[in-house]
Image: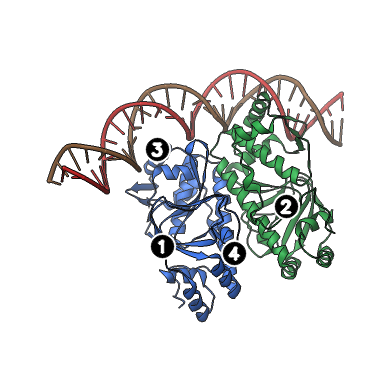
Chain colours: A blue, B green, C red, D brown
Amino acid sequence: MTEFLLQRLGKGVSAAGQAWLEERITHPRQFKQGHELVYEGDTCDEAYFVLDGIASRSKHLAGGRRTILAFLLPGDFCALDSALGARMDHNITCETPCSIVSIPRGRFREMLAAHPRLATNLANDVLLGGAIQRQWLANMSNSSLKRIAHLICELMIRMSRIGLSEENSFLLPLTQHELGEALGISSVHVNRTLQQLRDLGMVRTMDRVVVVTNLTRLKVLAEFDESYLDTPFPSVERFSPTDEPSY
Amino acid sequence: MTEFLLQRLGKGVSAAGQAWLEERITHPRQFKQGHELVYEGDTCDEAYFVLDGIASRSKHLAGGRRTILAFLLPGDFCALDSALGARMDHNITCETPCSIVSIPRGRFREMLAAHPRLATNLANDVLLGGAIQRQWLANMSNSSLKRIAHLICELMIRMSRIGLSEENSFLLPLTQHELGEALGISSVHVNRTLQQLRDLGMVRTMDRVVVVTNLTRLKVLAEFDESYLDTPFPSVERFSPTDEPSY
DNA sequence: CGGGGATTTGATCCGTGTCAATTACAGTGG
DNA sequence: CCACTGTAATTGACACGGATCAAATCCCCG
């Protein structure tokens, strides 16, 4: 598991540097579905790295409702701001059971200071997260059908990049209610819209597996332009499952 | 004008440092309304600092439509990613005539290297921008009435912090169409919703001036919690109009 | 005085929310 | 192994918020 973090974190860092990193990384912890890692308003003094499961950034709204602002997949960092001493403006929640590495502020700073390249990698991640955030906001202007289609396209790509997709399918252990919270639509409508996508022959969902039956048409429908998911710094290569192991 | 940038940029930087900064800052340029400073996909090799006017982050959608992702007010930076070499995933546009300082990549890096405190200030700005972005996304789950109310609350505070509000009013030289692009609703509905706010006795708009006639009730309606606009790093004081000049 | 964009208003249509009820299913305990 | 229970998925009926289309001012500017 830890190799995964190293591959993402340590890309471009010397072998010695990677050993140094590995020493400093605490063992992953397991969290139950629904566990809140960080609350809005907190400064939790550590950063998190998702090894397994799906976490989220979320905010609570009036009436007990909730919005999901981002999905955090394996390989994603979160609460970096908090680790640098900033107040969190949103919650970090485990939407499924999660395996997560936490990095205390002190160690985090050590790591950054010792490995400038690591800082670049992180900056890249932060910018990518911002780009995804903006894309989500832009999507809110589209119909719910396009929105779901777009989210599925995004997740398909993000999942495949971390080796968590097969053929044209991936595991998405989220309820339709949670999808609704992320898309800003009711769970009832999520259900109907997914059926629409099935009837259009683009996506089938069963159990918790999403099968994209026609990616090309799905992308057209969603007006999906993949480039926002590219690494913001052209010079930074990101880890991909096909890479040679670098250790 | 440049003092303004210095106050924002150079908070906590020595007097000598501020002089050094001032030397390096090029003269502001004037741009017409509608001018696109940076296009999606570009790497423009410079950062921008808004001195006067309102700019925006925007994306183009299908059918010639457009989404506004953020408003950039005087005192805001933009295209920092681009200045660091990243590809822009959105456009930066002047929504009104603007006076803007551009900082070429080389100088930008010099400045950062020479003044760590400046980097902290910028990081603070970036985090604040992210927080606003997330809040906008969260707001999309609310009714258009709440959305407009929330945007007005936010702009009221941001404007007042830079000394651009009087009493309970501020100048907002945007068309209802542009407000719609930012809120994800049609201009016709913006119009009707603004009338609703007037009828509720909370906001009046005339010419391009927004008058908040009952901020308390407006905040309640919008479920507005100001804290997301606070400086993310508690240790970083931001420039405010009531501060002693620091030069 | 004329012209073009912005605001305003009216009428109508449709996408989604909401409420409610049913079904499917997984986990639990007897 | 099966009844019991709670949660998620599904379906139907209905109401309503906003979009859309059109037309009528309004108003700034040349």
Same chain for mark 3 and mark 4? The answer is yes
User: Which chain does tag 4 point to?
Assistant: A
User: Residue at the location (57% across, 45% down)?
Assistant: B137
Picture coordinates of residue A237, whole percent (x, y) = 54, 69
- As drawn, the label of residue A123 is 4
For the C terminus of chain B, give its image quadrant: bottom right
Q: Which numbered disc, 3 or 1, marks the residue that appears first in the sequence?
A: 1
Circle 3 Cα neighbour tier, 10 Å, few/some/many (<14 / 14–19 / ≥20): few
Mark closer to the observer (2, 3): 2
Which residue does the numbered mark 2 point to in the structure image? Answer: B76
Name which residue lies at 59% across and 45% down: B135
How far is the residue under mark 4 from the one under mark 2? 20 Å
Local crowd size for mark 2, using a 10 Å CA cut-off: few (<14), some (14–19), many (≥20): many
Residue wearing tag 1? A29
Q: Secondary structure beneath disc 2?
A: loop
Q: Nearer the viewer, residue B238 or A207?
A: B238
Mark sitting on residue A192? 3
Q: CA distance from mark 2 to mark 1?
A: 40 Å
Give the label, 2 or 1, closer to the camera. 1
Amino acid type, callout 2: Asp
* Callout 1: chain: A
Using the rendered image of the protein, determine whether residue B28 is visible from the camera's viewpoint.
no
Compared across the picture, whether A232 is left or right of A3 comes to right
Mark 3 — on which chain does it sit?
Answer: A
